[in-house]
Amino acid sequence: MLTLYTAFGTIGLACEIALEEAGAPYEARRLNFAENEQRADPYLAVNPKSRVPALATERGVITETPAILGYIARAFPAAGLAPLGDAFAMAELDSLMSYLAGWVHPAAAHRHRGYRWADDPAAIAEMRRKAPEVFGQAMGLIDTQLFKGPWAMGEAYSVADPYLYVATSWLPRDTLDMADFPRLADHHARMSERPAVRTVLARVAAG
């Protein structure tokens, strides 16, 4: 049994969807950020980075979203969530997920968590102002150039799709109009209809 440590409103949702798509045996443990559970000793023993998601396996804990998604794809190959037999296609998949992790996600985070990078209230305010522009530019690049369609990597659904789905869901939160990203908006709508996504969202809503 795998254990996914996640929290409401975080990128951990992508990993939970991928686990559901894979038909993996897992349970989701949701941390309460309002009570700083991610910084409490029990969770620090799991992930000293005090971040989510983290995936506990029989061999140890995996952290960082691209690594977790890559593990799910490789551990459950029958689900077909990655082009495992094609080295170049795998590199393309890893490239998109690395871009989401290394640039898109931090760009979005600067609006809501500027305190991680600065103490000066004016600097934090400037990050809040600028971050949606940077985030929007990154998502615009995906929409117009990196997204292959109909799924993130082309004809085949992959672990990149739930990752992109969650990132796209942050557009309205960051004051950006989904209509300005038509291909991502279409992808988001189709993702919302997938049974695995509906199952996970219903579970999250139920608490």
Image (cartoon, grey):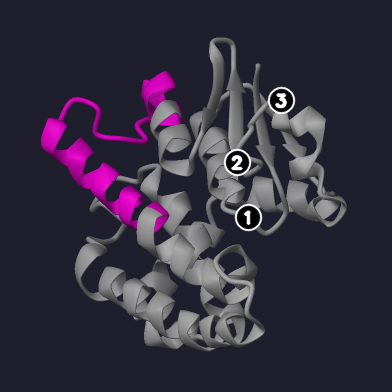
Q: What is the number of the mark on residue 45?
A: 3
Q: What is the number of the mark on residue 53?
A: 2
Instruction: Name the element at disc 1.
Output: loop
Along the viewing direction, whichever of 108 and 15 lies nearer the viewer: 108
Q: Is residue 1 above or below residue 68?
A: above
Is any atom of residue 12 visible in this view?
yes
Seen as rendered, the residue at the extreme left is 88
- Looking at the image, residue 80 sits to the left or right of residue 51; the answer is left
Chain part drawn in magenta:
72-101
Q: Is residue 97 a member of the stretch shown in magenta?
A: yes
- Looking at the image, residue 150 sits to the left or right of residue 132; the answer is left
Check whether the beta carbons of the residues at disc 1 and disc 2 lie within 8 A of each other: yes
Q: Residue at x 84, y 57 (%)?
A: 34
Q: Is residue 158 above or below residue 119?
A: above
Q: Is residue 75 above or below residue 35?
A: above
Q: What is the number of the mark on residue 10?
A: 1
